[in-house]
Image (tube, coloured by chain):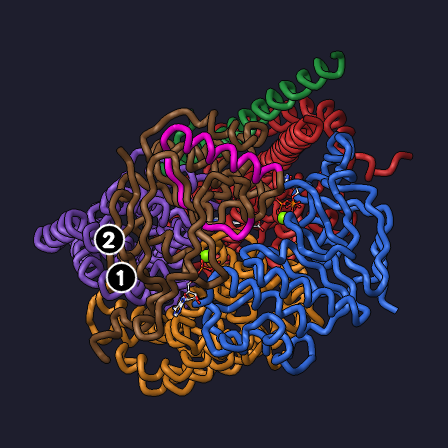
Chain colours: A blue, B red, C orange, D green, E purple, F brown
């Protein structure tokens, strides 16, 4: 059974440790909302969970091949159509059928439009639809609702809820209210690295 | 007996190098001054090359150090990749400008020497060409260090470049040998070919080589210290910022 | 993997995707050479094989920064690194796609441009063979350079600087094959060396490339 | 001064160029080193002052 | 305006900003030429002036995509277009900054590289003069090309393609000056033409560049 | 006196007209919030107001040299420090003194940090601080609060309010609530171009 557990995790950006002592457990069907002011380290934490950077300390159980990541950028090719973009990711993840994903984010009418001609919010919806074709149980998303209008935010919440209903997990960093009252809120600012350890990464040797 | 890895601690390294450096500077200066003065003023002219033979006291040591500096960087890069001692990464960084200067000296003195000997400043002789390629590798290595902000990634990436570059440098050497047969004389410092350089030239040359080696060591130690101090300064500033 | 190859090819063929640009650059460099060294045909014949190889190398080089930088900028590389494909494989495939859209067309174009430079008749065959054997190495080595500089904004020029010295052996052997061919000399040894470089590099380089790419994504 | 014969210019310029390069390298290194030392001292004294406070 | 010039220069000198890379590229191209055409020094002497001009042109060309594309990507150009500076002036200043960090260093480096290619002794002076007079035109024309391709992602290769034909007259006259100089012939006419191109282009081109840039920003 | 008035404006993106019949007047001290679902044409309208693209029809009074624009991207140089970035824009606009702008967005502690090392929200704050150094009365801003946390959104609202208090004007496209109740809300979706006119730009000649 898919679980995500982190124990006493510390994460660093640049040469500086930003968060430390992080711990939580996420069971299937649960979602975690990461909160914290600008620069508190949410992006850093998500990238570490996704395996893009090694943790500074502590361990991550689960994750790995189970996790799908969506960052600040959507990884869209402006010269490919909406459908082509999505099909590419479906093939990379070895799944098939992009129609449900298109439908979930109301992109079906735009399916043959080049991604470069979409508006900011439409691009974002396409980026989110990618999560559906990964077929992975854990979603790690960084400010997924940037540029989305209220209706699209609701679409997003509904999609996440459906994903959780199928036993999926989600870790979402956001500043706004997503309309997911059932999700746990995890405020990262409580775990800000203390002054000593703030420089305690590769700088350590020099102090 | 203490492990040599202890000196991989930056602070320890600073303290030790502080003690060694003055000695090194003095020895290097002494060897260079003695060797060069001996070579310049008190050696006879060669019967074929005339007084230009005196250039050998700069050209050969610089050429040797140009190669050895790259070897040292290669070793330091390996140490960084395997054991992740910051001092070795910074030592590799510190050695590159020294190495590139040595290469430049070898090239410039060689070119100046070539004018009377071969009648041209430059010829695409395999050995000269290999040195030019080495020069390019140094340039690329230094440019990569300069282009990356995060010091640890810079160390990682330049180390890999150094490894890959070494393989290609060797490959280039074979390619160049194949491509053109040279004018340049072969290795003559090797022990079995004494006939090449007479003792009168040989002794001052050895002193000069010792001087170049010592100067290289002193410069690398000193520059490594500089790099360590810069890193330490940044680390402290970051900690201050984190406290604020 | 196949999806990645198809996507890269499709992107290259779309408007502004860069297919044919390498070719055009190759053409233009070749055309500029007589303007700069002067039009004497016997001189051109002598330098033709070398110029064509150099042109191919530069055309390849110029298109290298499309190899990874675009995917880096729009976040695709991050997503690809977390996807279930080994990065070594992904990089090999991307190098292959780069060769298919850049190197391969040059192989076919070279004889035509040889005419412009008065290439000796005996040279055509060996020019084509040497390019066909040598240009894959250029793409694979280029992928390493691209992976090395991917985090650096507009690393294009730095990329050239790092990659050009690595191209030296390939260039020497490749141009040597073409030159000897044009003069009717024996080409066996350099051709063997060229093939050796291509195979060795294709087998080993992707590991180095993936290593540096992972470091850069960190 | 030894008699350098017809190669005087050659030999002297080789020595001159090399010595300029060597001394240049040493001077640049020393200057960078002093600058780094000063910067570090500034930060360290600031830190001591803060620690006392 | 002064602020813009200073900023561009500062960015160029910062780590990774690209200063010196054009120079290094120039060096590398010059070095690769003997590898590709062979090491015979009499051949090299003949082609040296042309190769040096071609190398300078390519070094300039490769750095063109830094001229505007970076500012476009991060939105600076949009903001600059709405700021109280005439776009013509801004583009001239950016071309000037480009020349200062790319063309000018090449002028100083060319004699050193001339040594590598066995340039005839008489050629050094005229090589330097022709480069000093001609390279500003390359930057100004390049700014036009950069403005033309600014909206296109990784337009680098396309940019080269568009700009290269525009460089032909400058290259012809510039290389002619250097070649005649090296052979001890009279250089007056081509030098005059070269100077004419540079002045004409510096005076008129910025208007064309600003026009196409405005179209691209639309 | 600075005013901004648009009359019967139509704006186009790509080859298609997106909005038409737009009209409003903005007096000093007033702010206008542009709303509308994703893809409705807010970005297009703002770029037209800023003079980056010509209107399809109708006219814009005011604007021109009076308007300062902030788009989806912030125009920051990652290799310049925060202070250098801001000083550059101050000099371009011929104003001086970046300290108030830094202070307004709580960037003073970050002033010597390279812009490339800021977090998403910190970058955005720097982009917004740029508006203060332009010294221009009309602000046209496209989703200014993307990536900002709640505290920063408040900072932003306070800054806009102060700007209005000095007789400034602001046109702001946003999907979220800015905490500026005094601002007029202008829903662009009411002005969506009809099907006929949707292709009525340069295609016209061919129809
Ligand atoms: C311009 C580039 C040149 C480079 C890079 C270069 C490189 C080298 C190197 C690496 C060595 C050390 C060889 C060894 O002992 O293993 C060497 C030695 C030497 N080079 Fe050069 N050389 C250059 C030009 C010249 C020229 C123009 C001359 C003129 C005759 C020359 C004469 C010598 C001599 C006499 C030695 C000493 C070898 C010996 O010990 O007999 N070199 N050079
Ligand atoms: N190279 C660096 N050196 C020092 N600090 C850095 C570096 N890069 C980023 N930081 C800092 O690391 C912290 C964490 O950044 P991160 O992007 O994870 O924040 P975030 O929570 O995602 O913020 P936001 O909500 O604004 O996106 C920030 O304070 C940032 O300024
Ligand atoms: N080249 C094009 N061809 C056709 N339609 C286009 C083109 N480019 C953009 N569009 C469409 O123009 C409309 C307006 O886009 P615009 O970016 O102005 O919307 P927006 O209101 O800013 O949306 P968002 O809130 O998502 O940022 C969108 O529906 C978009 O899909
Ligand atoms: Mg973030
Ligand atoms: Mg928009």
Q: A148 and F117: which one is in front?
A: A148
- From the viewer's perspective, is B79 left or right of B209? right
* In the image, residue F85 above or below residue E61: above
Going 45% across and 41% down the picture, which residue do you hit?
A: F183
Chain under numbered label 2 = F
Q: Determine whether the beta carbon of the residue marked 1 sits less than 8 angstroms from the nearest atom of ligand 3.
A: no
Circle number at residue F27? none
Q: Residue furthest left?
A: E189
Chain under numbered label 1 = F
Going 36% across and 82% down the picture, which residue do you hit?
A: C109
Looking at the rendered structure, whether the residues under marks 1 and 2 are on a common chain is answered as yes
Badge 1 local density, few (<14 within 10 Å), some, or many (20+)?
many
- From the viewer's perspective, is A130 left or right of C99? right
Q: A180 and B51: which one is in front?
A: A180
**Residue D14 seen in the current view:** no
Quarter of the rendering containing residue B3: top right
> How far is mark 1 from mark 2, CA to CA?
9 Å
* The residue stretch that appears in magenta: F151-176
User: Which quadrant is home to the N terminus of chain B?
Assistant: top right
**Does dot 1 land on a helix, a strand or a loop?**
loop
Q: Which residue is mark 2?
A: F59
Tell me where residue C8 appears, x and y as whole percent: 52, 75
Badge 2 local density, few (<14 within 10 Å), some, or many (20+)?
some
**Residue E87 seen in the current view:** yes
Quarter of the rendering containing residue B123: bottom left
Q: Which residue is mark 1?
A: F56
Tell me where residue C176 appears, x and y as whole percent: 44, 74
User: Which quadrant is home to the C terminus of chain B?
Assistant: top right
Tell me where residue F114 appears, x and y as whole percent: 54, 37
Q: Quadrant of ligand 3?
A: bottom left
């Amino acid at each position: 059974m898919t679980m995500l557990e982190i124990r006493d995790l510390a994460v660093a950006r640049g040469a500086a440790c930003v968060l430390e002592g992080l711990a939580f457990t996420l069971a299937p069907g649960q979602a975690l909302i990461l909160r914290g002011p600008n620069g508190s380290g949410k992006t850093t934490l998500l990238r570490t969970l996704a395996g893009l950077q090694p943790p500074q300390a502590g361990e991550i159980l689960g994750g790995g091949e189970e996790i799908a990541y969506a960052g600040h950028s959507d990884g869209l090719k402006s010269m490919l159509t909406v459908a082509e973009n999505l099909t590419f990711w479906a093939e990379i993840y070895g799944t098939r059928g992009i129609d449900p994903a298109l439908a979930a984010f109301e992109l079906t009418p735009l399916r043959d439009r080049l991604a470069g001609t979409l508006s900011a919010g439409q691009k974002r919806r396409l980026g989110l639809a990618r999560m559906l074709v990964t077929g992975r149980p854990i979603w790690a998303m960084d400010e997924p609702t940037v540029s989305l209008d209220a209706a699209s935010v609701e679409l997003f919440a509904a999609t996440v809820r459906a994903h959780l209903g199928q036993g999926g997990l989600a870790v979402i960093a956001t500043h706004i209210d997503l309309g997911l009252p059932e999700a746990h809120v995890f405020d990262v600012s409580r775990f800000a690295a203390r002054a000593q350890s703030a420089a305690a990464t590769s700088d350590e040797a020099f102090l | 007996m203490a492990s040599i890895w202890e000196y991989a601690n930056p602070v320890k390294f600073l303290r030790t190098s502080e003690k060694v450096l003055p000695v090194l500077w003095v020895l290097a200066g002494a060897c260079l001054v003695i060797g060069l003065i001996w070579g310049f003023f008190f050696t006879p002219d060669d019967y074929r090359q005339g007084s230009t033979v005196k250039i050998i006291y700069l050209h050969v040591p610089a050429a040797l150090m140009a190669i050895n500096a790259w070897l040292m960087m290669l070793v330091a890069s390996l140490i960084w990749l395997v054991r992740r001692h910051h001092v070795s990464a910074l030592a590799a960084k510190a050695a590159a400008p020294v190495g590139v200067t040595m290469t430049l000296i070898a090239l410039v003195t060689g070119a100046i020497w070539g004018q009377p000997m071969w009648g041209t400043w430059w010829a695409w002789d395999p050995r000269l060409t290999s040195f030019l390629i080495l020069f390019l590798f140094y340039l690329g290595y230094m440019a990569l260090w300069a282009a990356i902000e995060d010091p640890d990634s810079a160390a990682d990436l330049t180390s890999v470049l150094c490894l890959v570059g070494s393989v290609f440098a060797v490959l280039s050497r074979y390619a160049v040998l194949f491509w053109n047969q040279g004018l340049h004389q072969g290795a003559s410092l090797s022990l079995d070919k004494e006939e090449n350089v007479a003792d009168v030239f040989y002794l001052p040359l050895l002193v000069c080589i010792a001087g170049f080696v010592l100067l290289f060591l002193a410069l690398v130690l000193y520059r490594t210290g500089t790099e360590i101090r810069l890193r330490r300064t940044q680390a402290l500033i970051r900690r201050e910022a984190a406290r604020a | 993997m196949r999806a990645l190859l198809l996507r890269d090819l499709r992107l290259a063929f779309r408007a502004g995707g860069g297919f044919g640009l390498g070719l055009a650059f190759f053409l233009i460099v070749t055309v500029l050479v007589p303007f700069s060294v002067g039009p004497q045909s016997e001189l051109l014949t002598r330098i033709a094989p070398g110029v064509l190889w150099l042109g191919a190398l530069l055309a390849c080089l110029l298109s290298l920064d499309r190899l990874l930088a675009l995917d880096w900028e729009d976040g695709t590389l991050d997503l690809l690194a977390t996807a279930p494909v080994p990065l070594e494989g992904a990089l090999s495939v991307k190098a292959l796609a780069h060769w298919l859209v850049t190197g391969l067309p040059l192989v076919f174009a070279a004889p035509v441009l040889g005419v412009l430079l008065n290439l000796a008749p005996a040279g055509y065959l060996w020019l084509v063979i040497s390019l066909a054997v040598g240009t894959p190495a250029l793409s694979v080595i280029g992928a390493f350079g691209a992976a090395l500089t991917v985090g650096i904004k507009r690393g294009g020029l730095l990329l050239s600087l790092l990659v050009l010295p690595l191209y030296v052996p390939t260039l020497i052997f490749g141009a040597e094959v073409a030159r000897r061919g044009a003069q009717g000399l024996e080409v066996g040894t350099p051709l063997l060396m060229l093939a050796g470089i291509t195979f060795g590099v294709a087998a080993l380089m992707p590991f180095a490339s993936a290593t540096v790419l992972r470091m850069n994504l960190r | 001064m030894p008699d350098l014969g017809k190669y005087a210019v050659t030999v002297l310029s080789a020595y001159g160029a090399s010595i300029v390069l060597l001394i240049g390298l040493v001077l640049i290194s020393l200057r960078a080193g002093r600058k780094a030392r000063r910067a570090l001292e500034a930060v360290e004294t600031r830190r001591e002052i803060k620690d006392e406070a």
